[in-house]
Every structure is written in C-alpha cells, then in structure tokens.
C-alpha cells in the first residue's frame, strides 16, 4: 500500500509538470500562429496538446493509486483510461515524426515547401494523425488477444493489456518510425554539411580579398548536438519500456511487470515533459514569445502593485498629493 501511495504521488507530480509545461508552450505557440500565420508551428502546437492530454490522462490514474484496496477499479473503466493514455502517447510520438518530416521537407525542398505544406495539408495530416492515434489506443478493446484474461482490481497498464500489444506496437510502429526518424535527420545533416562545404569553398575563393576577415564558424557540431538530443530523448524514453516488454513476452517466467509499470513506463511518459523543452524552447521565435509573455506578466504585476490599496489606492494617493501641494503653498504664503 505504501509503495502504491508513493507511486501515486510521483504520478501526480509528473502529471502536473507535464500539463503546466505544455500549456505554457501551447499559449506561446498559439500566439505566434495568430501573429505570423505560420502553418508549420501547428505541428508544435499539436505536440503540446498531445502531451498535455497525456498528462491529463495519467492524472486520472492517480486516484486509482491513492484509493483504498477495498475499492478496486472496474476493468472496463481501467481499460478506457489506459486506452486514453496509449492514444495520447501515440499522438505525441506521431507528432514528433511529423515535425521531423516537416523540417526534412523544408530543407530538402525549400522552393516547393510552401506549395506542399499549405493549410489544407497541415489540417489533413493532423486529422489523420489523431485518427491513427485513437485506433492504436483503443485497439486492445476490440482484439481479445491484446487483453489480459485475469484482472485483480488494481488498475495498471499490464493489468488490462497483454504484452503482445506492446510487442505489436514495437515491431509495426515504434522501431520502423525510429529508423525513419534517424534517416530524416541523417539526411538533414548531409544537406547541412554540403551547404557548409559550399560556404567554405566560397570563402576560400575570396580569401585574397578578405585576408584579414576571421573564418566563419561551422555549424556542424551544433547540428550534430541538436540531432543527438532529439533522437536520444525519443529513443531513451521509450526504448527501455518497449524492449523489456518484448522480453516479458519471450520469457513468461521473468515477471518484469513491476519494473515495467513503476519505472520504465514513467520514463516513457517523461518524454512528454522533455518535448516542450526540446521541440519548442529551442526555436528562436518561441523563446522570444516567452520573453514577451514574461515581460507582459512583469508589467502587469508592477501595475497591480502600484495600484494596490496600501495607501488608499489611486484616490488616496491623489488626496495625499493634493495635501502635500496645499501645505507647500501655505508655507510659501507664510
């Protein structure tokens, strides 16, 4: 019971952080979309919405962890909650792939990008993404082989879903998507390296004219670092959970459910807390929007403090100024 309560507290803190972080990112990105009419930022907004929904979904599991064992959760309700969690996580992962493809297309086809990625295409991609995500999340409810035959009343992922479901997702969805993800960014690195080499050749050709000009710093290391963080966070967050689930399917006597549900599953869910930092904070325009929001909040707080009723509010201050002015005139007449 004590372990369940501590896990519920961790789950509650993680859910609160996920919802708060992604809500801030969604506000900033939505302001940018309304200001700049940028359709590509819709993918970043969708990522924040999907991650916030995941935080909301796992917050519903907190009550199950903190409730008394005498009041078990019904299997149907637990299955619906886990389906909601799975569909939100699938939407988050698929949006990451969509962002990767969007950036790949912008670099690979810069002249045709705005013709291809118009408002209709963005809306169609997002609609298809949520359709596929919900199909993935609620798939175990329609396939008996993906459900557990026994249920003891304690709601958790593997209490209602069989590891075969995770095995299917890993082989059909996750690992092919990961390979595609790596391909996109490796090709982006290749294009960036080609552009950098062209810049060096141009500077070398004009070296006699600009003999005293310092050489331009290459951006290869920055690009490699960015790609390493993007791929690393995506892989390290979900791979341990999926690989261990595959091991559990292959080894029925291993009993890895405790490690899967209380450690590795939380690691995968934690990716929704990293996403607003990696995919939104690193964009220059989003950082500038955060600065503007913080400045507006600071100005609002300053205005509230200046208008506080500490000295009678604005009317009291006006009377104080009038009194001081009257006394000054009296002293001058005296």
Image (cartoon, grey):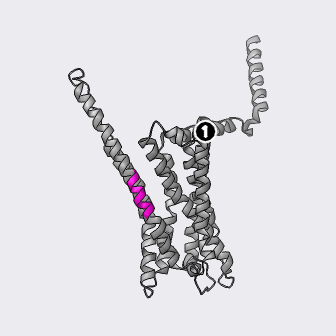
Prevailing SS of the magenta stretch? helix
Q: Nearer the viewer, residue 140 or 236?
A: 140
Residue 57 colored in magenta in the image: no
- Which residue is drawn at the image coordinates 38% and 46% (left, top)? 188
Report the residue marked by disc 1.
298
Tell me which residue sits at (47%, 50%) in the image.
101
Q: Residues within 10 Å of mark 1 (few under 14, many from 20)?
A: few
Check the image and report above or below for 44 versus 3: above
Q: Nearer the viewer, residue 255 or 200?
A: 200
195 or 313, which is in the foreground?
A: 195
Write down the region rendered in magenta: 176-184
Instruction: State the quadrant of the C terminus.
Output: top right
Q: Is residue 195 above or below residue 90?
A: above
Q: Quadrant of residue 60?
A: bottom right
In the rendered image, the residue lying farthest to the top is 333
Percent x, y of residue 290: 55, 42
Is residue 181 shown in magenta? yes
Taking the image as drawn, is residue 262 in sight? no
Q: Is residue 218 above or below residue 151?
A: above
């Amino acid at each position: 019971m004590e372990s369940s309560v501590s896990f519920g507290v961790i789950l509650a803190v993680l859910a609160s952080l996920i919802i708060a972080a992604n809500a801030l990112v969604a506000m900033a990105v939505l302001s940018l979309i309304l200001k700049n009419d940028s359709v590509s930022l819709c993918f970043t907004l969708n990522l924040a919405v999907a991650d916030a929904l995941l935080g909301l979904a796992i917050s519903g599991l907190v009550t199950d962890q903190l409730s008394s064992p005498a009041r078990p959760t019904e299997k149907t309700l637990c299955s619906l909650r886990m389906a909601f969690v799975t569909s939100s996580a699938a939407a988050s992962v698929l949006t990451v792939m969509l962002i990767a493809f969007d950036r790949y297309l912008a670099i690979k086809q810069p002249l045709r990008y705005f013709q291809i990625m118009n408002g209709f295409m963005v809306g169609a991609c997002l609609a298809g993404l949520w359709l596929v995500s919900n199909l993935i999340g609620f798939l175990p409810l329609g396939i008996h082989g993906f459900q557990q035959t026994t249920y003891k009343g304690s709601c958790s992922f593997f209490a209602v879903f069989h590891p075969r479901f995770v095995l299917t997702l890993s082989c059909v969805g996750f690992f092919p998507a990961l390979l595609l993800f790596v391909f996109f960014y490796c090709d982006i690195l290749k294009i960036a390296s080609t552009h950098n080499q062209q810049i060096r050749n141009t500077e070398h050709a004009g070296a006699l004219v600009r003999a005293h000009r310092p050489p331009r710093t290459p951006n290869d290391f920055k690009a490699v670092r960015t790609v390493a963080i993007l791929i690393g966070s995506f892989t390290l967050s979900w791979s341990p959970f999926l690989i261990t689930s595959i091991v559990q399917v292959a080894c029925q006597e291993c009993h890895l459910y405790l490690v899967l549900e209380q450690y590795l599953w939380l690691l995968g869910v934690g990716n929704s807390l990293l996403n607003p930092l990696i995919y939104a904070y690193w964009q220059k325009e989003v950082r500038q929007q955060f600065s503007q929001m913080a400045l507006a909040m600071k100005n609002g707080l300053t205005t509230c403090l200046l208008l506080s009723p500490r000295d009678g509010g604005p009317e009291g201050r006006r009377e104080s100024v009038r009194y001081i002015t009257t006394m000054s005139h009296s002293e001058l007449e005296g």
